[in-house]
Image (cartoon, rainbow, N blue to C red):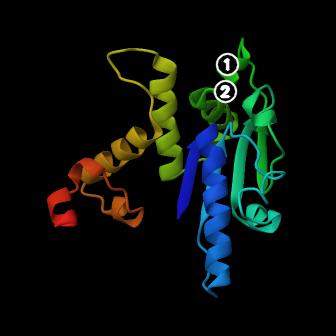
Amino acid sequence: MYLVGHSLGGGISEIVAANLHEWATGQKLKSHVQSFGVCSPGVLLSSAKFGFGVEALDKTSTSLLPRRDIVSKVDEHGGSIQYSECDAGSFLQCHMTDNVLCEVFYGCPTDLSTGPKYEWLKNFCFYSSAHNDTLGKAQIGKSILNYADTLKKQNNTAWKRYNITDINDWDFDRILG
């Protein structure tokens, strides 16, 4: 299970993932939980307050942090950390998800970038850089769904491997009934 969030949501994803990891290992279960925070505050020094140990954070947390983002400077970070520079004109722009993800995406060699994650980010960064109201706002979830739709139109069943589900397709009456 992946818990993903931006800003405070990234910090919360780290807290929840570390707590779930400790609960699972305490029950003698294998933990398959990871968190991914973008521009998130750290939670390392606050770990005891939030009920988990530093080791759980180190095993579950991945953070993408722009060096000029003020929110990322709160507390300390544990786990895997990837820093990005951020050449944006203001600190506020350095905190925006699309600036951070697209900086990393465009910084990667294209010959190493293949597969669905590449396609998701390419779609996301296209909508992000377009700044065009007719195209819609860049949203990573929307980009993942666009990729799945493209595969479905091509009669390619690879989208099933990634368990891509649009909640708009869910039958809540059946689920709750």
| Foreground pick, 89 / 31 | 31
Q: Name the residue: 71% across, 47% down.
A: 63
Q: In this image, 77 relative to 126: left or right?
A: right
Q: Quadrant of residue 90?
A: top right
Dot 2 crowding, Cα within 10 Å, few <14, some 14–19, many 20+: many
Secondary structure state at the residue bearing disc 1: helix
Residue denoted by label 2: 95
Against 122, is 90 above or below? above
Q: How many marks?
A: 2
Specify the label residue 112 is tagged with: none
- What percent of the width, then of the height, locates residue 160? 34, 64
Q: In this image, 19 relative to 136: left or right?
A: right
Residue denoted by label 1: 92
**Cβ–Cβ below 8 Å for labels 1 and 2?**
yes
Q: Name the residue: 56% across, 50% down.
A: 4
Q: Is residue 6 visible?
A: no
Quarter in which the C terminus is drawn: bottom left
- What percent of the width, then of the height, locates residue 87? 75, 19
Q: In this image, 26 relative to 165: left or right?
A: right
Q: Name the residue: 38% across, 62% down.
A: 163
| Foreground pick, 111 / 140 | 140
